[in-house]
Structures are given as C-alpha cells and as structure tokens.
Amino acid sequence: MCLSLLLASLLTLVQLNCENLFDCRHDSLKQDTEFTPEGDRRWTASKYWDKLDNTAKTIIACGTEDGDWRLPDLVALCEVENDSVMRDLTRRSLLRGANYEYLMTSSPDVRGIDVALLYSPGSFAPVRHYPLRVKPMKGMRPTRDILYAAGRIITGDTLHIFVVHATSRYGGERRTRPHRRLVASRICLAVDSLRAACQDPMIIIMGDFNDGGDSPVIRQICAKGLTDVSAGATGSHGAQGTYKYKGRWESIDHIIASPAAARRLHSCTVNDAPFLLVAVGRYGGVQPLRTYRAWRYRRGYSDHLPLVARFAFE
C-alpha cells in the first residue's frame, strides 16, 4: 500500500533526442529529401516504421525502475518532423495502447525538425501551450521554436514545461555559441514573465541544448535561480552522459528546474539499457546505437540516450 502511494506521487519526465524521426514523404517547403526513398539515406516506409517502434521501445524502457513498471508521464522529444509522425508514434507504433497525447511546434527550421511533448492525460492536463519563436541573428539560419506548455498535475499544482532544441555546433562551437545564447535569452525572458505573473512557479526546462553543463549557455539559464537537476547524471551500463563524440561522453541534454520543482527531485539518471548501446572498437567502451553509422543503416535507436527524472509530490 505504501509503495503504491509512493509510485502514484512520482512524476516521471523523460528528455529524448530521437535523431531524425522523419517520415518518408518529401515536404516541398523543407530540405528533407535525404530522408525519402530516393534520397541519400534510402529512407523507406519499412525503415520509418522500424524507427517509430524503436523510439517507442526507448520510451517504454524509461518507465521501468526497480521492478515496478509504469510509463513515463511526460516525454520531451527533439528531432521529430511533423504532426503526421507524432500521430503515427502515438497511434500506430508500440505506444498505441499507452493513451499518450501530444503537443508540438511547427518551426521555420530548414530541415523541418521540431520538438514535441508527449503526455499522459491522467498525469498532466494542459491548460495552455504555444511556441516561442527565436528570431535569428545575422548569419544564423532559422531554428526550432521552443515549446511552452502549462498543465495541471495530479496534486492540482500547475507545472510549466519548456521543450528546447538549441542550435547545433555545426560550423564550430565558438562560432555558433551566440546562436545558442540567443535561445537561452529567449528562455530566460519567458521565465521572467512567468515569475512576474505567479509566485514561485514550478518550471521544468527539458531539451537538447548542444552544450555541456559548464557552458556559458547553461550558466546563463541557471543564473536565473534555476538548477540543472541532470548535472552528473549517469547510466548503469557505462554511460557517463547522453551523447558520445570521438570516444568522449558529453551531457548536452539537460533537465533544468526552478526551486519549486528542484526541491521535489527524487532522481535523475541516464537510461543506458543494453539494447540502446553498441560496443566501440576504436575508442573502447560503449556508445549509443544510432540509426545510421555514417551512411550505413544500423537499425538503431538514436545518437542520444534518454534522461529520466523523477519528481516526488505530496
């Protein structure tokens, strides 16, 4: 009985970069031909459905802890192409019986990738949501919108969620850093607005920031009195971060919380279930089993591992 009450009071949140969750149809307004049957990746319907089910398996695995299985309550997703993909993920993949609903953006990103929030209606009841546009600076391509969603949780409290996919480091970390700082400034502005409207709001920011915890970008956000609750998160099968580049683990995915949320943190870990990993010959150890290795199809999951945070509510 006591264990059941504890489980009912735990809210499980997941941050996952899906790595190119595209359908196999060309959108004439986007640069997505790479992920079509005729494109460089030879992205067929069969590969698409495998990718959906692999994404679903990853999410389902994040609901397992200490033998007590329960699906995550909220899942922040990066690199999902469109509403059609999200509909297939929630209605036609291995998640079809999970009763998930979703919110997502429709951004000006040139490749057509967006962010989304999966939620269990029994755990999170949206009251409002909208995209936050990041106006590009000179020399910066249009980037992903930030998704903002506010909803009631089981305790009756309002939880404010931001889902972020900051600009990549393509072109050089230092040269692209101002682009990610622009994204951070937009987040900080939104946090200030929430605090002006309500006292001690419960805020959780989740996403792929393409920057580590000691970067100017994350420090800029945390300077607002927020805490990176995912700092130092590791897995139980060798993962020392969510992403591995040239043999080195990095933590570029983050879950950042306001004091009202951070003080309720129960745990935060990297889910490095063995099926999400592959042994690395050149550098040793393991790394995420991604969909492609260079141009070779591997039928994997993602180049990122999911972050799993649990918050306890009374």
Image (cartoon, grey):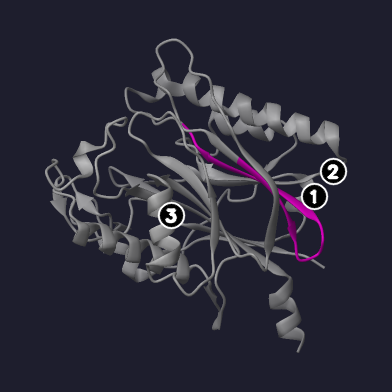
User: Alpha-carbon distance for marks 2 and 1?
Assistant: 6 Å
Q: Quadrant of the N terminus?
A: bottom right
Quarter of the image where one finds residue 214: top right
Q: Which residue is mark 3?
A: 86
Q: Which residue is mark 1?
A: 260
Quarter of the image where one finds residue 122: bottom right
User: Alpha-carbon distance for marks 3 and 2?
Assistant: 33 Å
User: Is 219 on the left or on the right of 16, as rendered?
Assistant: right
Q: Which residue is mark 2?
A: 200
Can residue 238 be seen in this snapshot? no
Q: Which residues are magenta?
A: 148-166
How many neighbours does mark 2 have within 10 angstroms: few (below 14), some (14-19), or many (20 or more)? few
Residue type, numbered disc 2: Asp
Can residue 205 be seen in this snapshot? yes
Residue farthest to the bottom, as pictured: 1
Q: Position of residue 199 (x, y in %)?
A: 88, 41
Q: Quadrant of the C terminus?
A: bottom right
At numbered mark 3, what does the secondary structure look like: helix, strand or loop? helix
Q: Position of residue 163 (x, y in %)?
A: 56, 43
At numbered mark 2, what does the secondary structure look like: helix, strand or loop? loop
Residue type, numbered disc 3: Met
x 38%, y 53%: residue: 85
